[in-house]
Amino acid sequence: MSTEASAIPQFKEISSPDPVLEIHDLTKRFPGVLANDHISFEVRAGETHGLLGENGAGKSTLAECIFGYYKPDSGSFKLNGNAVSFDNPTDALHAGIGMVHQHFSLIESFTVLENVLLGYRPSSEGLKSSNVEARFTQLLEVYGVHIDIDARVSQLSVGELQWVEILKALIYDVDLLILDEPTAVLTPQETDRLFQALERMLSEGVSIILITHKLREVMEVTDRVTVLRRGKLVGTVNTEDVTMTDLSRMMVGREIETLCRSNQVVNGDPVLEVQGLRALNDRGQLKLKNVNFTVSEGEILGLAGVSGNGQKELFEVLVGVRRGEKGEIIFDGKNITGTLPNARISFGIGYIPDDRQRTGLVGGFSIGENLILGRQWEPIFRRGLFTSQDSINKFAKESIAAFEIDSPSHHRLVRQLSGGNQQKVIIARETSKSLRLLLANQPTRGLDVGAIEYVTRKLLELRDSGVGILLASEDLEELMNLSDRIAVIFKGEIVDIIPCADANIIEIGLLMSGAKSGSQ
Amino acid sequence: MTLLSVLGVLSSAIFSGTSLLYTTLGEIIDQRSGIVNLGLEGVMLVSASSGFAVTAITDNPYLGVLVSILAGALMNMILGFLVISRRANQLASGLALMFFGFGLSAWIGRSYVGAKINGLPRISLPGLSNLPVLYSSLFNFDLLIYLVIPAAILVWWLLFHTRWGLGLRAVGENADTAYASGRNPLRIRYQALFVGGLLVGLGAAHLSIAYTMNWTEYMTAGRGFIAVALVIFSKWNPLRAIVGALLFSGAVAFQLLLQSSGIQISPFLLDTIPYILTILVLIAWGGTPKHSAPASLGRVYQGTE
């Protein structure tokens, strides 16, 4: 935000724009993975440069290399024409590069101001926190954000956290701001506000790298876009020269099948009825206030909401690993409120948790062992007090074939599988029993397009076979494509349930942000 | 119970609680940066023995205190090398450090068992000189006692009101985040262990050079572990540690008084009073939902490679 920088936009119109950042032949390797394979591109002064690619394409790794968090194996950078090399984030921050990380890089137990101070380097202004405080307060004002700087980070909403992250980065004199999937946790309205803020930053002379896998965002705000696929550079194009279809072909390498929206009217019997559910989280805060809904046979009920509004707790209560304070859970007409998780599994309830590695699987167990987790007491997997290795092996081999799990052997540890294959193991385990209800919390999160296609196809197959499905997703479009009805959760309450045929994304966004209360 | 015996308990609590408080303060700094130092017992023993030996040789207790402090920092650096640079398991490394300290201190102190030293001189407060000697002698403290509460306040100020403390606590909460914010977790953890070691050294110095003024093998008798418990008890807060250390050593002094008063309870049972008290307080405080432990306590920082 220096005076030289603000002169750049005019300069740009006269001659060909100078690059702020040039990346030449960058390669970064992790054990067994080539994350970035000889990538070269440049970011011009005053532009918003999109970095587009599927999950796992290497976008975040590339960004963390620019920011000095990772050290590239080879390749070079030029910043404003000068060769630079960053050993750590401190170097990058000093050189004028700011970054908003994909996962919040805030200390939960600190206040907002303490988090800002943590990243603030001492300068000629001295160490006084009052200077930083004044500057941050000013930034909040300029961008019209209302956050109490003395509030603990753990008390803020996800949207507020994102603003703290962004403004924290701007408190430096940044020439280049890298935003890694900043909209992943925002409602459509918050996303719009963020994009307006980007305009403002550009006018202050900041250049921006926007990392995303959402084509619409690229089309809306970027000037140029660089596409990565499986660690390799596909190319850099002017956004105005391409269509969304072009970009998606560059990103995936083939045409993607688009799923049609459901128009079916569901009239099956209810599988799951939830009445007046109330529950606390681990910290003892009320996360579910009064939740009521029904899932019918052969129906996908989508659950939309900004993360942290009670989705996690809802799934946990339904599965039985968290105790509700009040309310009833009726499954197939039976009250199962007080039953234990293993009983619910045996009733025919399947669960795909949002956190594959921690809740869904045991990383150090083999595929075969993970496939029977929770089912090890079933007679077919038992021989008296012991497990029956033969039937477990047989079951594992069949599952690997039926669910297209890409692994040479069922003895392979689950930890060694890719995210998509791990998810297939969970789906195989949860659906290869007589299933009545599937609870799926973000089953496509972090998967590549191929795996997403697989998961969604499976969900639709299950629905068509009469299973009731509760599906939560942070990807609203996916939710609208798959669901028969959409329930919107906000602050622990279902604010509205809309048949998908009548729903539009703007209305759902408003419901998600609490700006509009539903008809319920 | 007379006023004199109450004052006696208080005086003895202050004398024995001082080394405990210094040690607890040192461990608070270690743990706030994310490192559990279970080797405190060994660190204290090496500090206490080397400080005592130097005092015996040079007849200068201040030099002894200085050596003791440096020995504490040095011992902590050994732990630092293991758990920071070599990324070893903290609990195993701490226990190894403890056993190393047992052996090393026995060797350092072997020719000083039973030696007489001139310990840290007592400094009487001007106002107390008017009291009868019996009373005033109870409150003739040495320099380290006068400095212990200021030290606790200083540690509190460092942790909660300086940029250094902010970075240190951030590393203890989430080292990756601290790194992304431009801090160096490895350097900060070494610094924390160094400063923490200085304080543990002070505690050990008070034990051998000022309080008991002698050296015997394993003279710390579990003080290092009590300090670890006091860190949890004080919820990683230096100011609360003052209360914790006084309460604990007060209970010890009280049960000693009971024993000497000839009460008809087995001394073995009386010995347990301080620990029962600790458990009771932990029960009363323990259930609060607000977690105050540093979030990545005990976790090895792997870096980004």
Image (cartoon, coloured by chain):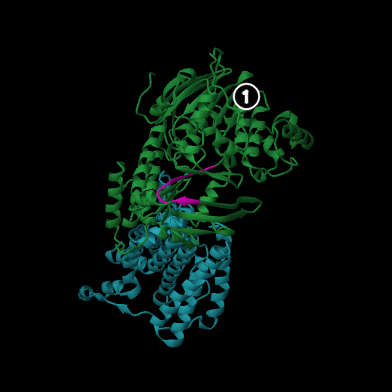
Chain colours: A green, B cyan
Tell me if residue A352 comes above or below residue B158 in the rendering: above
Residue A45 is covered by the magenta coloring: yes
Q: Quadrant of residue A433?
A: top right
- Along the horizontal axis of the image, is A299 left or right of B147? right
Can residue A371 be seen here?
Answer: yes
Magenta residues (range)? A42-52
| Outermost residue, right side | A390
Tell me if residue B187 comes above or below residue A489 in the rendering: below
For the N terminus of chain A, the image quarter is bottom left
Residue at 27% in and 56% down = A130
Q: What is the crowding at mark 1: few (fewer than 14 residues within 10 Å), some, or many (at least 20)?
A: some
| Outermost residue, bottom side | B58
What residue is disc 1 on? Answer: A348
How many numbered callouts? Answer: 1
Tell me the subunit letter for badge 1. Answer: A
- Along the horizontal axis of the image, is A283 left or right of B143? right
Please name whichever residue, B151 or B169, is drawn nearer the observer in this view of the structure: B169
Please name whichever residue, A140 or A107, is drawn nearer the observer in this view of the structure: A140
Residue A52's spot in the image, x, y percent?
Answer: 52, 42
Tell me if residue B34 comes above or below residue A445 in the rendering: below
Residue B280 is covered by the magenta coloring: no
| Outermost residue, top side | A267
- Along the horizontal axis of the image, is A463 left or right of A502? right
Can residue B271 be seen here?
Answer: no
Residue A368's spot in the image, x, y percent?
Answer: 72, 38
Residue at 49% in and 73% down = B74
Tell me if residue B202 comes above or below residue B258 in the rendering: below
Q: Quadrant of residue A414?
A: top right
Residue A366's spot in the image, x, y percent?
Answer: 70, 42
Q: Amino acid at mark 1?
A: Gly
For the C terminus of chain A, the image quarter is top left
Magenta region, main secondary structure: strand
